[in-house]
Amino acid sequence: MSIDAFAVIAEPTRRRILDALCGSESSVGELVDALGVSQPTVSKHLKVLRDAGFVTCRTAAQQRIYGIDTRPFQAVDGWLEPYRRLWTRHLDALERHLDSQE
Amino acid sequence: MERDAFRPGPPGEVDCVADDDRWTLVLVRELRHPPATVWSALTEPERLREWAPFLADRDLGATGPAVLTLVDGETAVEQPATVRQAEPPRLLEYTWGGDLLRWELAPTDGGTRLTLRHTVADREVVPMVAAGWHLCLDVAGHLLDGDPVGPIRGAEAKNFGWPELRDAYARSLGIDPGRR
């Protein structure tokens, strides 16, 4: 995955937008009301998230509804994979240690 | 004026025009100052920072790229902008992220008729944009009158009548506030 995707989700307000959209699809107005930030701020961050592929948009009754696109998150998840194995190795070591105590 | 005493004026005349798959807010405001004075308020960074929703990295009175930084409390979003037309003191047009803003200044007996056309992607956002500029232009009016109240930007606008203005403009534009 590209460095840019990490830069996108490094911004706290953008993560709050993603958290809200993870719960349910939302319009801009719903996000403005839910997050307590201004409409221009929500709109600007939504554009960055859309450009980076984290957020999709569909139109219903002349209203744009925003939602999560899971694909960039799979890339983030893939980046984490070797670190998860690291964690498993530590657990294995703990288990061996406990075995040796018996 | 004391900042806490500031209240926005009543909603003005606005329109919403379809523009391919985008939407343009048209907002007209009469100002008691000549176009040259209004032009400097629209273009000079040290004037913009006293009333506009963004900070500008350069004078907007010349065509070419610029950076406009949206300020909202502790956070700031830098957005690339391009000044596409600058004809002082009558026409200023620039992009701001995905938005397009066009300011037309016409001299009147009492000052300037300022027409803003702000094009956005979401129709639902148009009443919010109208409410935001309404507040900003009220603040700009105080500034030009020599009675500044200081900039009102970002979520702070919600404490200065923004939700009521948004709802009033949504009604007058016939735009359903929608799922809320």
Image (tube, grey):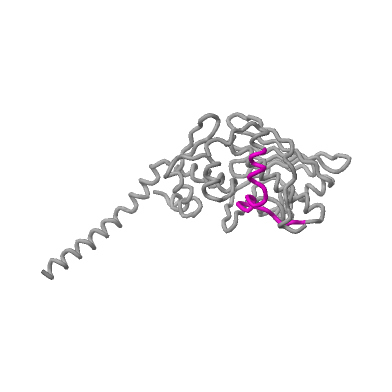
The quarter holding residue B92 reads top right
Q: In this figure, what is the number of numbered marks? A: 0
Q: Which residues are magenta?
A: B148-168
State yes or no: residue B160 in magenta.
yes
Q: Position of residue B107 (x, y in %)?
A: 84, 40
Chief secondary structure of the magenta portion: helix
Image spot of residue B99 (x, y percent): 61, 41
Residue most toward the bottom? A101
Residue toward you, A25 or A96: A25
The outermost residue toward the left is: A102
Say which of B40 and B18 sits in front.
Answer: B18
Residue A89 in sight: yes
Residues B163 and B107: in front is: B163
Picture coordinates of residue B120, whole percent (x, y)? 61, 38
Q: Residue B41, image x and y in percent?
A: 76, 50
Q: Is residue B163 magenta?
A: yes
Q: Is residue B46 visible?
A: no
Residue at point 80%, 56% (across, down): B147
Q: Which residue is found at the position 81% from the left and 49% from the top?
A: B37
Question: In the figure, is residue A78 to the left or right of B154?
Answer: left
Residue A54 vs residue B148: left or right?
left
Q: Is residue B167 left or right of A94 when viewed as pictured?
A: right
Residue drawn 49% across the image and 40% down it: A26
- Give the vertical position of A64 relative to B136 (above or below): above
Q: Is residue B1 left or right of residue A92?
A: right
Quadrant where the N terminus of chain B sits is bottom right
